[in-house]
Image: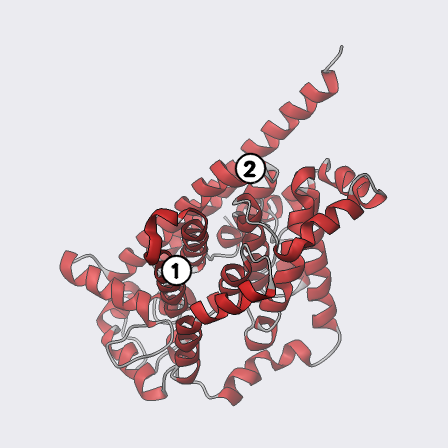
Amino acid sequence: MEGGPKLMTSWTTKGLTLLLAGLLLCELFFQLRTATSWGHDSWQMGDWLIHYGEGFVRRGFAGSAVRWISGITGWQANHVVIGISLMAFIGLGLWMGFRAKACFSTPYLLSSLMLGFPVYQEGVVRKDACLLLLLIAGLALMAHGKKWRGWKWPAVVIVAMVAILIHEAFLFFGLPCLLLAGLKTTRDGVKRLLIFLPVFVCGLAVVLHHGSPDQAAAIHESWRPLWEEIENRPVPSEPASAIAALGWSPAEGRALVAPMWAGIYQPMAWAAVFLMSASLLLAFTRRESRADTMGWGALLLGGIAPLFILGTDYGRWIFFWSASVVILVATRTPVPWGVADRLRARIHGGRIEAIWDLAGKQSWVLLLLGLPLLWSIEIFTQAGPLPRFFFRWIAW
């Protein structure tokens, strides 16, 4: 009977992996089917279709590219968006499957805390997977760019700038990763800051020239035939969703986030969700990689924290944080300043590591728990794969 428990664990893990993969594919099918009906009031579609046709605005790079592709191919722009989003998500999934599984449990990578988050929160048709792929590209250039000689750092800078022009959230998770990757001394950090000076200028331009109400109205008007084609009805003349947000004043933006800080309930709820997500990330990190996960997780907290004040997609911010950590650890990017080595000496063989080992064996929790996009008890309880499937089946 030697090896019996290990064999059982192996089969259990394989069964859980197949079940999570099946639930993920089912939900992905439902989402892509409904995405074709997303029109002018859809944040997902509107965010993709912001463009530079009416002047420089934030997030306009992707929409301009979509307009160009649609113009030369004749394909409907929303179908181009869905196609690009799907290819990016599949690309990210394949990369995770080949690279990240060496450092993280496969069920975790398929759960609604990682790859499943965009699917279960109707975020596949978002820019998230594209931004994470650009982060991977930047790290790959930094790690394997010796043959590029003098072109290595300009290429990394261009990748970072493109990512920021697609969505400024990259400033808060992707840019810190590229700034900190492989640093050994403070002098290296100063040199890296100087190299990335054009990236900071790009970020400042996006912040200062985010758009105006007139530009938002003009962009909306340019897509009016598309909106009416999608929705099969006349659409209002006023812009909506992400396009309307281009014209928001700082006061309007703060008003959107204000309920988060209106009382103690929301901050405590999100702190609990973050702690749960961080604990499960560590529990499903393979033992030899946990110090790197802890080190990168702690360093990236400072970068992602401002997003909780600037935007309301709190679940996305946590996903960006955890996905960035997974990418950095999977690419074997050294944690700067020897942080991981000091952590490794402290946690190796300790009680906290035993707790993580025990938690990591309870893989079934990944079927129930998920990362909500916005906080409420209802959204949280339906964020996991099995509850999501159950409620969808009830609705059907």
At numbered mark 1, what does the secondary structure look like: helix, strand or loop? helix
Q: Is residue 314 left or right of residue 219?
A: right
Give the residue number, with chain letter if any, for mark 2.
101
Q: Position of residue 291 (x, y in %)?
A: 69, 47
Please tell me whether mark 1 or mark 2 is closer to you in this view: 1
Choose between 186 and 274: the one closer to the eye: 186
Q: Is residue 68 left or right of residue 8?
A: left
Q: Which mark is residue 25?
A: none
Q: Say what amino acid the circle numbered 1 marks.
A: Trp
Q: Position of residue 55 (x, y in %)?
A: 27, 81
Q: Is residue 372 left or right of residue 225?
A: right
Judged from this view, the residue extending furthest toward the right is 351
Q: Position of residue 137 (x, y in %)?
A: 41, 52
Q: Say what amino acid the circle numbered 2 marks.
A: Lys
Relative vertical location of residue 13 with respect to residue 192 in this rendering, above or below: above
Relative vertical location of residue 325 with respect to residue 258 in this rendering, above or below: above
Choose between 242 and 290: the one closer to the eye: 290
Q: Position of residue 376 (x, y in %)?
A: 65, 65
Judged from this view, the residue extending furthest toward the front is 187
Judged from this view, the residue extending furthest toward the top is 1
Identified at 36% across, 87% down, the residue is 213
At numbered mark 2, what does the secondary structure look like: helix, strand or loop? helix
Relative vertical location of residue 21 with respect to residue 72 in this rendering, above or below: above
Q: What's the CA distance linking mark 1 and mark 2? A: 29 Å
Contact, CB < 8 Å: mark 1 with mark 2? no
Q: Quadrant of residue 46?
A: bottom left
Identified at 65% across, 76% down, the residue is 260
**Mark with earlier residue (1, 2):** 2
Identified at 53% across, 89% down, the residue is 251
Q: Which mark is residue 153?
A: 1
